Amino acid sequence: MAMGNAKPAFVCESCHQRRTGASTLTVTGRRLCPDCSDQLDAAAAGAIANPGNPVGGAIATAGWLAALRPHRRARRTSGNRGTG
């Protein structure tokens, strides 16, 4: 049966919120929403970039991304004001 323009719904296995649209399947088989997927990517990047303290690097990088996210959203919703 065709679904038309309906987006598939899923429950994120990290934040446990019901979402629609795009999801990411991790290497361990968990289905994540885009926000949780970004957090996982940032934590992995932080752990790799800081071999002397991988846990601290993961926490710091994921926290930095989480703090940056509201600014990115505000910029996206404001359009291109002030760029011309």
Image (cartoon, rainbow, N blue to C red):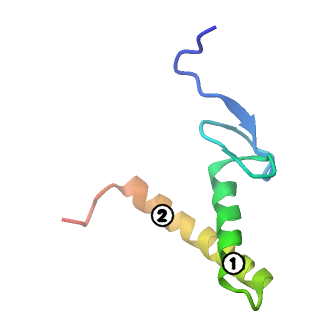
Q: Work out whether mark 2 precedes mark 1 in sequence or the reverse, and give the earlier one.
A: 1
Q: Which percent across, then down, holds residue 82?
A: 25, 66
Q: Mark 1 Cα within 10 Å, few/some/many (few <14, many 20+)?
A: some
Q: To which quarter of the image does residue 60 belong?
A: bottom right
Specify the label residue 48 is tagged with: 1
Which sits in the foreground, 14 or 27? Answer: 27
Which image quarter is the C terminus in?
bottom left
Identify residue type, mark 2: Arg
Are the residues at dot 2 and dot 1 in contact (C-beta closer than 8 Å)?
A: no
Task: Kindly report which numbered mark, 2 or 1, lies closer to the viewer in this rendering.
Answer: 1
Q: To which quarter of the image does residue 63 belong?
A: bottom right
Check disc 2 and report its element: helix, strand or loop.
Answer: helix
Q: Which percent across, then down, holds residue 19?
A: 68, 39
Q: Horizontally, is 21 left or right of 32 in the view?
A: left
Q: Residue furthest bottom?
A: 52
Q: Which percent across, then down, holds residue 61?
A: 65, 77
Specify the label residue 72 is tagged with: 2
Q: Is residue 52 above or below residue 40?
A: below
Q: Is residue 84 above or below residue 18?
A: below
> How many discs appear?
2
Q: Residue at x 79, y 53 (%)?
A: 14
Mark pair 2, 1: CA separation: 24 Å
